[in-house]
Image (tube, helix red, strand yellow):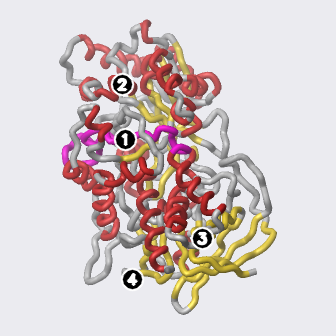
């Protein structure tokens, strides 16, 4: 069976919804295809915390945060570390990523906030400070808080674009083609002119759960253009390990998975087969603060802790990690340090007080933050008076990775029991905690982490909701002691299809592949690698918004 529309959009995540919304606004007829059911639109973004990178926003200014385009660009370049420029007339792998990055920083300081507000997106008033950096002014990390949380988290960000798409369905402009798995791109006369799909059996599973891949039919959809917004590879551990870079040390044997099972990279081969250039495939973004979900939705379901700065971070053998490998500072630096220094072990530990657990252990994900997701001011205010938020306490009560105890000896015994090996020595951990606690006896001290905790509390957001007042972990008023086992959590692809600033897919010569567009994670969030080697956080969802918008507008212009 063959059908025809103006544009096919492959993938109903955030980038695909944004692209489709732009096409609908331009009056184009669109087929939005996805291998999952259309009752659950939004992809990974729906599960997200909803963090957005903005520069010099009203929210920052109200919190007395002084930001600028120049400072943000300095931070972005220091984090990206681009080093794959073109030579001898050939487009380098980083050439377009750098251009996308500059355009994105300007957008984040300009139109982005107003564009979202026009669509009904609102922001939580407290700005967070993610990826605080490697300790150098010109290196990795955010110099100031820039992590703006969507009021409503991921579902709140998806909502206006899903609404625009469903309005397009009602107007006869959009065909929602769920349970359609694209197996190939159709070409004619050198241009991409459609897609071939397997039609999958209906399988009304809950959002995020693995669904059937039973094929019940085939269809070909012809179009004037195809925009691929199919996401990354985070659930495909074979691909993650194949492209795992040597600079991060050996890949872990065991990981937890931070994305649903359908995030499998299945569109990469079809894209490459029609000439699209895939670049920077060894660049990826995985977290080191992953917990096994006590109520998993997808296989190996992991949840990330978004930590405040106070916990002692120990490797699997009980050694304290050196600065800048501190909670919330340098994600990939910490990952590389752990994989190089203790490659035989796949876990590390946070050790802290219960006060730190309650104040500083935010959990990533819409489902882990029912107050913010449900836009409940009362429940959000309740965090201030709650010892430990209920979602965090659930991991203490029902999870496999959290232990508590009144003494170091009992705590370490439970840590070792959890891993089934006598890897951690109680006397060593006692010495680390005692040394740390002595640094709090006055306002001076030489411990870098203690100094950074004190500095963090000069930020209004940290003082209000993210950083506990400095206190001795051995103070019984802040007990019991807590240890949290952490594992690598797979998440984002930083490379992908190289694209120009119109989201047109480029070939090996740097020329556009006629009729083909790519946006979101499959395009490295812009240009095949807008982040370079490292992210500043809050930039993944924003990259889907920015590139999806560009793809939708460019495809609309091309199909007039």
Determine whether the residue tagged by mark 4 lies in a helix, strand or loop: loop
Q: Which mark is residue 147?
A: 1
As measured in the structure, the alpha-carbon distance from the residue carrying label 3 to the one carrying label 1 is 34 Å
Q: Which mark is residue 30?
A: 3
Q: Residues within 10 Å of mark 3 (few under 14, many from 20)?
A: many
Span colored in magenta = 131-156
Q: Residue at x 26, y 44 (%)?
A: 56
Q: Of discs 2 and 1, which sits in the foreground?
A: 1
Going from N to C along the chain, the mark reached first, 3 or 1, is: 3
Q: What secondary structure is marked by label 3?
A: strand
Q: Position of residue 445 (x, y in %)?
A: 20, 20
Residue beneath disc 2 = 467
Q: Are marks 4 and 3 in contact (CB under 8 Å)?
A: no
Q: Which mark is residue 511?
A: 4
- Of tags 3 and 1, the one toward the viewer is 3
- Which circle's residue, 4 or 2, is located before the other in the chain? 2
**Residue drawn at 30 percent across, 39 percent down:** 58
User: Residue 203 colored magenta?
Assistant: no
Marks 4 & 2, CB-CB < 8 Å contact: no
């Amino acid at each position: 069976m063959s059908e025809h529309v103006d544009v096919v959009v492959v993938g109903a995540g955030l980038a695909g919804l944004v692209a489709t919304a732009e096409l609908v606004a331009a009056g184009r007829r669109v087929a939005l295809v996805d291998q999952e059911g259309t009752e659950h639109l939004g992809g990974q973004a729906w599960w997200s915390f909803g963090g957005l990178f903005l520069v010099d926003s009203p929210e920052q200014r109200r919190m007395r945060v002084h930001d600028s385009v120049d400072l943000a660009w300095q931070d972005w370049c220091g984090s990206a570390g681009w080093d794959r420029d073109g030579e001898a007339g050939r487009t380098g792998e980083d050439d377009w990523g750098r251009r996308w990055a500059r355009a994105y920083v300007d957008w984040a300081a300009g139109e982005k906030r107003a564009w979202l507000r026009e669509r009904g997106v609102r922001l939580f008033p407290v700005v967070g400070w993610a990826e605080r950096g490697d300790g150098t002014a010109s290196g990795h990390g955010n110099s100031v808080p820039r992590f703006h949380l969507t009021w409503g988290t991921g579902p709140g960000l998806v909502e206006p674009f899903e609404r625009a798409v469903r309005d397009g369905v009602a107007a006869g402009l959009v065909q929602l083609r769920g349970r359609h798995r694209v197996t190939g791109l159709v070409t004619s006369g050198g241009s991409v002119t459609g897609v071939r799909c397997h039609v999958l059996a209906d399988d009304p599973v809950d959002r995020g759960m693995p669904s059937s891949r039973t094929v019940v039919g085939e269809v070909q959809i012809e179009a004037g253009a195809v925009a691929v917004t199919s996401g990354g590879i985070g659930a495909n551990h074979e691909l993650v390990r194949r492209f795992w870079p040597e600079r991060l040390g050996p890949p872990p044997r065991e990981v937890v998975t931070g994305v649903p099972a359908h995030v499998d990279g299945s569109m990469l081969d079809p894209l490459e087969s029609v000439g699209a250039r895939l670049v920077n495939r060894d660049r990826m973004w995985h977290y080191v603060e992953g917990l096994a979900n006590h109520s998993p939705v997808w296989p190996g379901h992991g949840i990330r802790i978004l930590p405040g700065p106070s916990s002692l971070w120990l490797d699997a053998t009980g050694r304290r990690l050196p600065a800048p490998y501190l909670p919330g500072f340098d994600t990939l630096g910490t990952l590389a340090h752990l994989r190089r220094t203790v490659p035989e072990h796949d876990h590390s530990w946070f050790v802290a007080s219960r006060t730190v657990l309650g104040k500083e252990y935010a959990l990533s994900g819409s489902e882990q933050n029912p107050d913010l997701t449900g836009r409940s001011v009362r429940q959000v205010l309740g965090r201030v008076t709650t010892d430990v938020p209920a979602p965090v306490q659930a991991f203490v009560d029902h999870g496999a990775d959290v232990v508590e105890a009144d003494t170091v000896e009992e705590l370490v015994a439970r840590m070792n029991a959890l891993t089934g090996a006598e890897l951690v020595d109680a006397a060593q951990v006692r010495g680390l905690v005692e040394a740390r606690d002595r640094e709090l006896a006055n306002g001076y001290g030489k411990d870098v982490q203690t100094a950074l905790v004190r500095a963090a509390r000069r930020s209004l957001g940290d003082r209000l909701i993210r950083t506990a007042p400095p206190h001795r972990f051995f103070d019984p008023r802040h007990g019991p002691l807590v240890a949290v086992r952490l594992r690598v959590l797979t998440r984002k692809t930083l490379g992908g299809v190289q694209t120009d600033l119109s989201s047109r897919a480029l070939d090996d010569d740097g020329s556009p592949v006629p009729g083909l567009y790519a946006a979101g994670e499959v395009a490295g969030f812009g240009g095949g690698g807008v982040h370079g080697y490292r992210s500043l956080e809050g930039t993944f969802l924003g990259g889907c918004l920015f590139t999806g918008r560009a793809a939708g507008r460019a495809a609309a212009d091309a199909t007039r």
